[in-house]
Image (cartoon, rainbow, N blue to C red):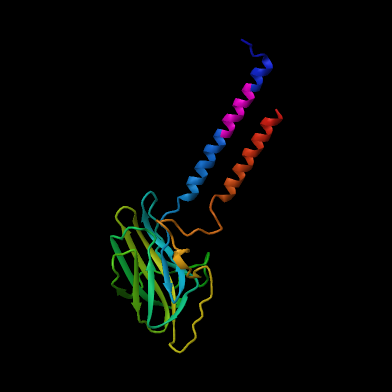
Amino acid sequence: MNKLNDGDMLSIKIRWSNIKKVAGIAILSLFLLVGSASAGPPPALLEIDGNEQIAGIGDSCWKGEECADTFSIITPAEPLLTRSPFTAHLRLPLQESPEELGFSAIRVTDDDALRNEAVNDFRAWRYGLQGMNIQVPLERESDINLSLEPGLYVLKVFVKWEEKGDVSYGFLVQVNDPEAEVTNNVSSGGIPAEPDGINAPIDGEPVQTPDMPGFGAVVAVMGLLVWVGLAGRRR
């Protein structure tokens, strides 16, 4: 049997050291990916006249997450434009039907906003504003027929799932005069509806956007993996 000389032993030690480094970096990368995927309750969607709006997320108590209190109603900054009467199609993010579902239409003015300007494409409205409560079936998707006077409205949705928790959603809708022309511009809060639910959350997953949390960290980890491999080859 051939015996390993000192050079061979040193080479084995170097390779084993590199393997441990790569394994450690891979584990770190996994933790980064898992951490970036944990994001609390996914958003609901509201469709009016063929245009969709992603809900703002307010107070929530979600399984595996700490309860979040915003003390306000959070909505997108830009409203969906429509005329009365109209039908709002509400789409909740989870497959299972909710245990509780509340829906209310609240007429607001700029004085009801906590700040005049939008922050990260969302606006916050004073809590406790009075509105019109509307009965909505305990289903994942429902059509809600509304007839509202012209004005700006916050549509507040409270949902509770038995196994997941509860969350308050907020939408913003501008009801124009029946004779006014309605043109919805694409913005961060309003997106044109696409066929087959392309923009809809699936199985409780949030809508994906190009700004992925943790993406920069993953790129850095991959670069470090390549560097370790090249360093091992040079040795």
The answer to whether 109 is drawn above or below residue 37 in the figure is below
Which region is colored magenta?
A: 12-22
The answer to whether 37 is drawn above or below residue 138 in the figure is above
Left or right of 8? Residue 156 is left
Picture quarter with the C terminus:
top right
Seen from the viewer's position, the closer of residues 219 and 64 is: 219
How many marks overall?
Answer: 0
Name the residue: 52% across, 44% down.
Answer: 32
Residue 210: x and y in percent read 56, 58
Seen from the viewer's position, the closer of residues 125 and 16 is: 16
Left or right of 48? Residue 137 is left
Queried whether the magenta region covers residue 210, the answer comes back as no
Residue 66: x and y in percent read 39, 51
Left or right of 119? Residue 11 is right
The answer to whether 149 is drawn above or below residue 21 in the figure is below
Residue 177: x and y in percent read 44, 87
Corner quadrant of residue 224: top right
- The single residue placed furthest to the top in the displayed view is 1
Picture quarter with the N terminus:
top right
- The single residue placed furthest to the bottom in the displayed view is 179
Q: Main secondary structure of the magenta part?
A: helix
Left or right of 108? Residue 136 is left
Seen from the viewer's position, the closer of residues 198 and 54 is: 198
Residue 229: x and y in percent read 65, 34
Name the residue: 51% across, 46% down.
Answer: 33
The answer to whether 85 is drawn above or below residue 55 in the figure is below
Name the residue: 41% across, 62% down.
Answer: 58
